[in-house]
Amino acid sequence: MSGYMKRCDCDKDYEDNCHDCCIKMTDPEPRKILLECGQNLESARFDLSSTSEQTFTLGRVIIDTSCLRKPEVKIEFSSIVFYQSSPGNSIGPAIELTFRLRRSCNNEEIVTVLTRVYRKVTQISDNIVEEIISSEPFTISFCECLDFPGCCEYIMEVSGNPANFANIGTAVVDDLSLGAFAQGVDCD
């Protein structure tokens, strides 16, 4: 966060009609803030008849920080991971998905900047066979300071290997949201 905290003298500031006293945020240089929303958001529906790993691009967002000095970027991603167990099994379902945030700045090579794993194993006691339906939010928040201003594309991907899923009848990642925020000192 830019700026610094300044502690006020509450008694003196109050006497000087400063009613919202004690801590003030000050910043020697004003910051410019940018917001970009994700593009081409698409759900991932895993083909469970496949035995090989599947990778889906969930969305991408492009943010141009060329108008900023000392750019800081924050990526916010949210989704719902939905799965349903296969009926008639005596062991619980298990699923593991790998989410990757990838980045390319100024048309350079794409690099992975963050990897997170969603893993869920459901235990069934006493061999009770139940159909299990799960719908859970999965979110990622990522911040970084860029070494240089420019145009950066962030890409969110998910991958999973249905051969490693246990007793899953349906596996979907949807209800997607992706956004990028950037702040920095305005170049003007």
Image (cartoon, grey):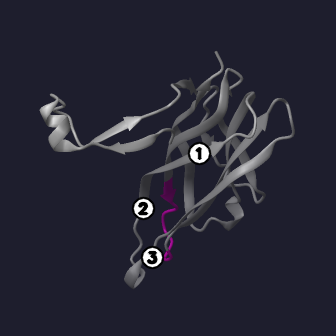
Marks 1/2: CA–CA distance: 35 Å
Structural crowding at the residue carrying mark 2, measured as other residues with C-alpha within 10 Å and reported as few (<14), some (14–19) or many (≥20): some
Pick the front one: 127 or 145: 145
> Disc 1 residue type?
Cys
Q: Is residue 35 left or right of residue 21?
A: right
> Disc 3 residue type?
Gln
| Residue 9 visible to an observer of this rendering | yes
SS class, disc 2: loop
Q: Which label was assigned to residue 143?
A: 1
Q: Which residues are magenta?
A: 83-91
The picture places residue 154, in percent across and down from the top left corner, at 69, 36
Marks 3/2: CA–CA distance: 11 Å
Determine which residue is flagged by label 3: 123
> Disc 2 residue type?
Ile
Q: Is residue 152 left or right of residue 16?
A: right
| Residue 61 visible to an observer of this rendering | no
Q: Quadrant of residue 95?
A: bottom right
SS class, disc 3: loop
Whether tag 3 and tag 1 are in contact, CB under 8 A, the answer is no
Image height of 144 relative to 164, above or below: above
